[in-house]
Image (spheres, rainbow, N blue to C red):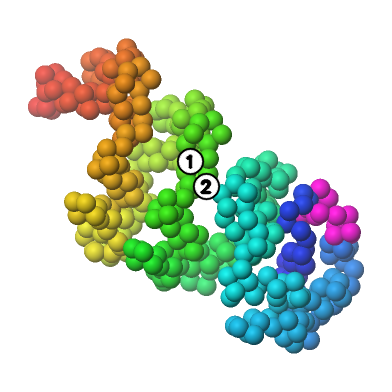
Amino acid sequence: MSAADICDNMKDQPDDKPRLHLCTVCHKRFTSKRWLTIHSKRHDGENLWYSCTYCEKRFTNQLYLKKHMNFHIGKYKCTECGKCCQHKQALTVHRRIHSGEKPFECAVCSKRFTSSSGLVKHSRIHSGEKPYKCHVCETAFRQSSNLHAHVRVHMGDKRFECTVCSKRFSSSPDLVRHSIVHNGEKPYKCHLCERAFKQHGILKTHMRVHTGEKPYKCSLCSKSFSESSSLQSHKRHAHSNRRPYECPYCGKLFKTNYELNRHARIHTGAKPYSCRHCSKRFTRLGQLKAHLLKSHNEGTWLICNICQKKFCHNQEFNVHLLRHKGIKPYRCIECPKCFCTETELKSHRLVHSDYKQYCCGLCGKYFKHKAVVVKHFNRCFDELGFSSV
């Protein structure tokens, strides 16, 4: 059995402490020199493994083996569900799932947790603290487990293989998430609207639509968001003018690599999203989802409870609800006008500006709005006689 296949004994390290001790062989980090010394024995080839007599797992320390054996002998067994824990403290924390006891409360949002480590991890959402930093690319993470999975990407370590398509992944959770692609299973259902999801994390995020919870606050303005990714996207679009990603075909600049890749498909004609029911292919995932709903009745419509109008996409649905409520969160700094979407505000701002970014490729005339230049181009095309070619 290789070191890669052996149980990772380092998971017992406290998750709320920085890992300052670096292994110079595999670049894994540890909370103390003792942990690093134990880990280094793997690379030194010392045969100091303690094997479990019930399964194939091996450990570098007798204490780890003893804790592991508690799973098999049932020393710390939950009387409610039969789950076995490694030690008494773990069993105490587990029992709180059944009792509903959550003694640890967040001082910011009052959310409660069954363990102190759960509270520590949650508090980093509010503080923005990411103490676990990758030594290769400087990417930072809130939890050490996320850093470990990320480091495997740099090392090319993809030990988890899909049995259906042989695609390999650097972590077990990534493989589990991928496997759902093949079976189409959506085991996580919302008890309020019956929507189903492939991952528990997506369901948790979805529940914030119903609760209105927005734990991710922008440090530069008063806005809050239900998802961390939405906050990061907001900061890039609203508070930064950096556009480091350039299109190699036309030179257009973008704020994110995702936006660049999506734009590049205009030039390449790539359609990476294919329908499993028919031969149609699509440039964007949203287009595929809309197609599945409209053509194959697969998926869940978003229905307005005021006018019963149906929507395929969350963004369109949320904007529609804002219009019913008369909420216009985007305000022009030049005049009192307000708008429902950032796109509408950007379009309006051109009224106050002389900037004309759209150019007719036939006559060289510039325009403020894309829709106007498209109409002009068609007219110009006919007037110059290209229609007869």
Q: Residues within 10 Å of mark 1 (few under 14, many from 20)?
A: some
Q: Is residue 215 above or below residue 250?
A: below
Which amino acid does the dot numbered 1 rest on? Answer: Ser
- Residue at the image point whose x is 63% and y is 42% from the top: 127
Tell me the number on the disc at residue 195.
none
In this image, 37 relative to 288: left or right?
A: right
Magenta-highlighted residues: 20-37
Does the magenta segment cover residue 292? no
Q: CA distance from mark 2 to mark 1?
A: 7 Å
Q: Which residue is mark 1?
A: 224
Q: Secondary structure at mark 2?
A: loop
- When asked about the image quadrant of residue 264, the answer is top left
Q: Is residue 165 above or below residue 37?
A: below
Indicate which disc, 2 or 1, sits on the residue closer to the N terminus: 2
Tell whether label 1 touches label 2 (CB within 8 Å): yes
Residue at the disc numbered 2: 215
Q: Position of residue 383 (x, y in %)?
A: 11, 19
Q: Where residue 12 appears, x then y in whole percent?
A: 77, 65
